[in-house]
Every structure is written in C-alpha cells, then in structure tokens.
Amino acid sequence: MPDFPAAPCFVHTPGTHEFWLKEAPLDQELTNPFALSNGWSENNIVFDAEGAAWRMIVPGASRYRKWYWRLLSHLYSPTFPIEISWKPLRPYRLSELLAVFKEQVTIDDDLLTQFYEVEEIYHLLDGCRNFDDVLSVWHKVERGPD
C-alpha cells in the first residue's frame, strides 16, 4: 500500500455531519482549534479513489482536546494550515461509501440537499458503479442543476 491515499478522497467522521471531498494536496489541510477540539482528526475515515480506507493523522492534534482549548475555541478559532500524515486502515467496498453518502444526505442540514431532494440524490447514488460515478454525483449535488 502507498504512504498516502489516491486523490480525491471522501472524508467522513462517523456520528457527525462531517462528510467532504479532499483533493490534492493530501499532505496539508486548513483547520481550526474548534474542529481539532471535537476530535475529527482522530475519528475520521477517508475513502480514496482506489478502494482503500485511511485515517487522516494530525500530529499534535490531541493537545486541542484539553478542556481549556475546547472552551477557548468557542471564543476564538482562527484557521491555520496543518501537516497531515496517513494511516492505512483497510480496503472498502463501494457499497460502504454509498451507505455513508446516503446517511449524510439523510441527516443533511441543507448543504447536500440545497439543490436536490433526498430521494433524487438516492436515485443518483443508486446508479453509481464506481468511485468516479460517486464523484460525479458529489459534483452534481454540490453545483446544482445546469
């Protein structure tokens, strides 16, 4: 297995609304203390373009889990770049990625469902046969009708 995922990747933090597309470069990300204090960097699952699941590792992120960072991050939480390393987890099936995408559509707060109804997105996802199809649905849902 390579040292990093094949871009682009879908990033998901189980139990949250976190589901987004990560494109190259894969060694950096913009974040803030609030996001790090919520632990997304410790619990995420990254689905890459070649069928491998990964974990995004942010060295030093655990320091933001302390009580005072959690409190301060509600008051002041500037965005800054962080270095990322990667931990391979396992291969994944397309059905797993589709299930996560559908779950996020169901609990969405009008980001994914801004232009399409839930049932319309489900229908688009049901037609997906590979990662590129899922990526096409993401872009269609994100950009809206032509």
Image (cartoon, rainbow, N blue to C red):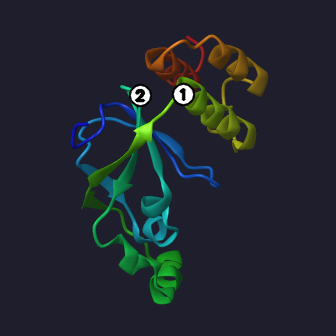
> Residue at 47% of width from left, 22% of height from top?
135
Residue 101 image-quadrant placement: top right
Residue 90, percent from left and from top: 42, 41
**Position of the N terminus by quadrant:** top left
Disc 2 + disc 1, Cβ < 8 Å: no
Q: Which numbered disc, 2 or 1, marks the residue that appears first in the sequence? A: 2
Q: Secondary structure at mark 2?
A: loop
Residue 21 image-quadrant placement: top left
Residue 139, percent from left and from top: 49, 22
Residue 12, percent from left and from top: 52, 46
> Label 1, on which residue?
142
Residue 138, percent from left and from top: 53, 25
Q: Amino acid at mark 1?
A: Glu
**Position of the C terminus by quadrant:** top right
Residue 16 image-quadrant placement: bottom right
Q: Amino acid at mark 2?
A: Gly
> Residue at 28% of width from left, 67% of height from top?
59
> In terms of depth relative to the viewer, which is nearer, 72 or 126?
126
Q: Which mark is residue 51?
A: 2
Residue 112 visible within the image: no
Q: Is residue 98 left or right of residue 84?
A: right
> Residue at 48% of width from left, 73% of height from top?
37
On screen, residue 38 above or below 101: below
Q: Secondary structure at mark 1?
A: helix
On screen, residue 103 above or below 86: above
